[in-house]
Amino acid sequence: MEAKVDIKLEDAFLNLEEIIKKLEASSISLEESFQLYKEGMNLLELCNKQIDQVEKDVLKLNERGELHEF
């Protein structure tokens, strides 16, 4: 299952938390743990892309009150 592009960052973090809980369960099969790992990595990639975009969008004011990209 691939991560959805339109998922909110907060929802992606919640999904990652759930994946971690499932991976920590002792009753999980190797196949299921590998699938959850791939899903988690997709979510991490999505989170990184969203965070990078937010960083690019952040603006700061200089001493003259003009906006400049961060």
Image (tube, rainbow, N blue to C red):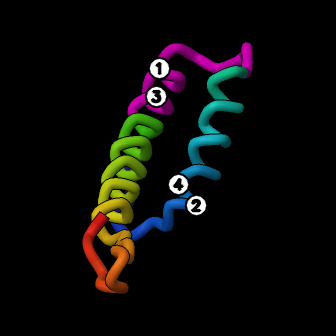
Pointer 2 and pointer 3: residues touching (CB < 8 Å)? no
Distance (Cα) linking label 2 and label 3: 17 Å
> Which circle, 2 or 3, is nearer the viewer?
2
- Which secondary structure type mostly characterizes the magenta part of the structure? helix
Task: Give the residue type at disc 3.
Answer: Tyr
Pointer 2 and pointer 4: residues touching (CB < 8 Å)? yes
First along the sequence among labels 1 and 3: 1
Q: Where is residue 35 in the image (x, y as percent from the top left)?
A: 44, 30
> Which circle, 1 or 2, is nearer the viewer?
2
Distance (Cα) linking label 4 and label 1: 22 Å
Task: Give the residue type at disc 2.
Answer: Asp
Q: Read off the residue under disc 4.
A: 12
Q: What element carries label 1?
A: helix
Q: Position of residue 55 (x, y in %)?
A: 35, 60
Which residue: 64% across, 20% down? 28
Q: Is mark 3 on a helix, strand or loop?
A: helix
Residue 42: numbered disc = none
Say if 46 sits above or below 21 in the image. below
Task: Give the residue type at disc 4.
Answer: Ala
Which residue: 31% across, 63% down? 70
Which residues make up the magenta segment? 25-38
